[in-house]
Image: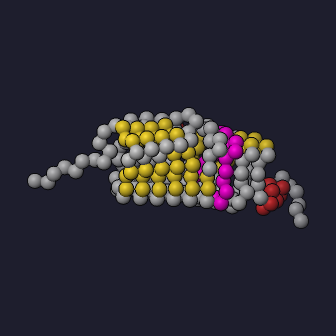
């Protein structure tokens, strides 16, 4: 008779735990709370985090493709080298605190969120959607924004220098002291009808 394997996520509260090498597609983590936990090399695609809480947690080399994060509390969460494709972050709890470094965020969406000081560093942001977000003092250094959609965003002091394939339409975004490289400035000038030598 085979013994049932207990879930590594049995229980509701987890503190200072490290989860390594898990492969649990569609795992339901709704209502659970994680404090100062680390997730390393975990495959959790399509996992469900409704009304859960992540505080001071890190995800390294994890796959969270198409995870459901409705009403997820996110405070001090770091994603490094992780796959976050197709996640709609728009319905996480208000004022999320998170950072992304060397992550794959293709097709991810962020709508009506305060993302002040959020770091998107050296990441693939192709076809990502940023709609009506406050990106004041956010940083995109080293990231690829090919076909990314920025609309109705506040881009005060937002750092795009060092990012590639950036296009910002000043007519549909609020720009003030927005930091861009020369290539972006040329593209914007050409879009406005200027000829640039």
Residue 86, position as x, y percentages in the image: 51, 51
Magenta segment: 127-143
Q: How many marks?
A: 0
Q: Residue at x 22, y 50 (%)?
A: 5
Q: Residue at x 35, y 55 (%)?
A: 22
In the image: residue 106, left or right of residue 144? left
In the image: residue 44, left or right of residue 143? left
**Colour style of the rendered protein structure:** secondary structure
Residue farthest along the left direction in this orientation: 1
Residue 80, position as x, y percentages in the image: 52, 56
Q: Residue at x 52, y 35 (%)?
A: 93
- Which one is in front, 33 or 110? 33
Residue 100, position as x, y percentages in the image: 56, 52
Q: Residue at x 57, y 49 (%)?
A: 99
Residue 79, position as x, y percentages in the image: 51, 52
Q: Quadrant of residue 48?
A: top left
* Chief secondary structure of the magenta portion: loop
Was residue 186 drawn as part of the magenta stretch in this picture?
no
In the image: residue 78, left or right of residue 156? left
Residue farthest along the bottom direction in this orientation: 197
Whether residue 47 is visible to the viewer of this picture, yes or no, is: yes
- Which one is in front, 21 or 17? 17
């Amino acid at each position: 008779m085979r013994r049932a394997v207990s879930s590594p996520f049995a229980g509701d509260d987890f503190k200072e735990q490290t989860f390594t090498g898990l492969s649990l597609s569609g795992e339901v983590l709704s209502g659970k709370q994680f404090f100062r936990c680390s997730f390393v090399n975990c495959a959790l695609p399509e996992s469900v985090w409704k009304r859960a809480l992540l505080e001071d947690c890190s995800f390294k080399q994890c796959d969270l493709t198409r995870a459901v994060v409705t009403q997820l509390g996110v405070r001090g969460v770091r994603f490094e080298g992780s796959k976050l494709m197709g996640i709609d972050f728009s319905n996480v709890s208000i004022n999320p605190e998170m950072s992304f470094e060397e992550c794959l965020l293709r097709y991810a969406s962020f709508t009506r969120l305060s993302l002040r000081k959020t770091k998107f560093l050296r990441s693939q942001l192709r076809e990502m959607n940023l709609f009506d977000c406050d990106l004041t003092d956010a940083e995109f250094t080293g990231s690829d924004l090919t076909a990314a959609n920025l609309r109705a965003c506040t881009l005060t002091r937002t750092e795009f220098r060092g990012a590639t394939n950036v296009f910002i339409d000043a007519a549909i975004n609020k720009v003030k002291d927005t930091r861009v490289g020369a290539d972006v400035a040329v593209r914007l000038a050409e879009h406005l009808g200027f000829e640039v030598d």
